[in-house]
Amino acid sequence: MDEFALIDRFFKGQGVSRKDVLLGIGDDAAVVRPADGRDLVITTDVLVNGVHFPESTEPAAVGHKALAVNLSDIAAMGATPAWATMGLTLAETNEQWLEAFCTGFFALAEAFDVQLVGGDVTRGPLTIGVQLIGIVGEAGCLTRSGAREGDEIYVSGTLGDAGLGLQVDSGMLTVAERDEAVFLDRLNRPLPRVELGRALAGHATAAIDVSDGLVADLGHLCESSGVGAEVDVARVPISDSCRRYLAKVGWEPVLGFGDDYELCFTAAPDQASHIEGLSHELGLGIVRIGRIETGTIRWVHGDQPFSPHAQGYRHFR
Ligand code: ADP
Ligand code: MG
């Protein structure tokens, strides 16, 4: 199967057809028409086999994750995802693998009304680069740079399950079967918080998605905003499964690993009841973990000082 047959069979005409796509897959480039005056947000994330997902990862999960990580960036900007392109580098054209990969990718694309409008297919080590474009709503977008002294710091969902998933996958950690399922599911099929991000636009002062670990990502947010913080690690939300292994593994996989794809955001204290309402509406936990201050980030555990020792993942360390 050459690349043209592959594109026709696996990508062309798949998934949703949006009204604002004037020209999708098949020409030299795609043409889309955003509503008059709408701002667009544009993001790209590349997944490399063995770096961003274990080589053993099922192809459907690879397809899911390739889009999910980009959806998470659009969520952190408070925008609505719309159009995607894909740069796909394959070692071989394994039809069964591609079939499953597309199942994972297009199921998530459909769930968020994202149309794949173009891409490229090349031969080489398995790598998936997805570009995603989102539309900014009337309330404007969220950035990392708007946090101000006195704002509360929140985290959605739970952190650490994906980090434990990687430890389980690599044989570093053995856990009960039901916990293993929780951890591997979070690692392989992250659920981007798109609805939350969109609802936070106009209410939160700053936001970031937790992809490199809370220590690193909250650090980015505070640096961009020119502020410090006090954060209580005892308030960081973790799942019951994660809590069972915390004594054994410590806080590193919770605070330092990432791949959680939750949102960390800041909001003025008068937004507290609105945020509580959002949490109920979305059926998603949202927990206050600290407060923005001037200066640096100080971690505490209850009333004790705490040192998180976590730097986040860096490719060129
Ligand atoms: P070109 O020769 O201009 O680079 P290609 O032959 O690479 O074009 O691609 C043909 C068409 O298929 C283009 O519309 C391109 O956007 C689309 N396409 C190629 N690869 C993918 C992919 N992985 N996913 C979606 N569309 C793709
Ligand atoms: Mg091409």
Image (tube, rainbow, N blue to C red):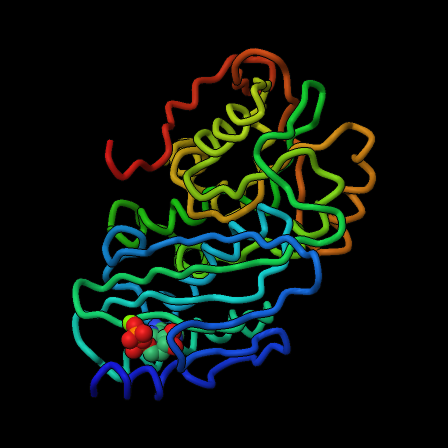
Q: Looking at the image, is 248 positioned above or below residue 54?
A: above
Q: Looking at the image, is 281 positioned above or below residue 270?
A: below
Residue 213 locus on image (x, y percent): 44, 37
Residue 58 makes an appearance in the image: yes
Q: Looking at the image, is 187 positioned above or below residue 316?
A: below
Residue 306 locus on image (x, y percent): 48, 17
Q: Could you tell whether 247 is left or right of 266 in the image?
A: left
Q: Could you tell whether 206 is left or right of 130 in the image?
A: right
Which quadrant would residue 114 be assigned to in this image?
Answer: bottom right
Residue 101 locus on image (x, y percent): 36, 74
* Quadrant the N terminus occupies: bottom left
Q: Residue at x 47, y 56 (%)?
A: 70
Q: Could you tell whether 241 is left or right of 8 in the image?
A: right
Residue 295 locus on image (x, y percent): 56, 11
Q: Could you tell whether 230 is left or right of 219 in the image?
A: right
Q: Residue at x 63, y 25 (%)?
A: 290
Front position in the image: 18 or 230: 18
* Quadrant the C terminus occupies: top left
Q: Looking at the image, is 234 positioned above or below residue 264?
A: above
Image quadrant of ligand 1 equals bottom left
Residue 101 makes an appearance in the image: no
Looking at the rendered structure, the number of numbered marks drawn on it comes to 0
Front position in the image: 270 or 14: 14
Which quadrant would residue 264 be assigned to in this image?
Answer: top right
Q: Residue at x 32, y 56 (%)?
A: 47
Q: Residue at x 39, y 68 (%)?
A: 63
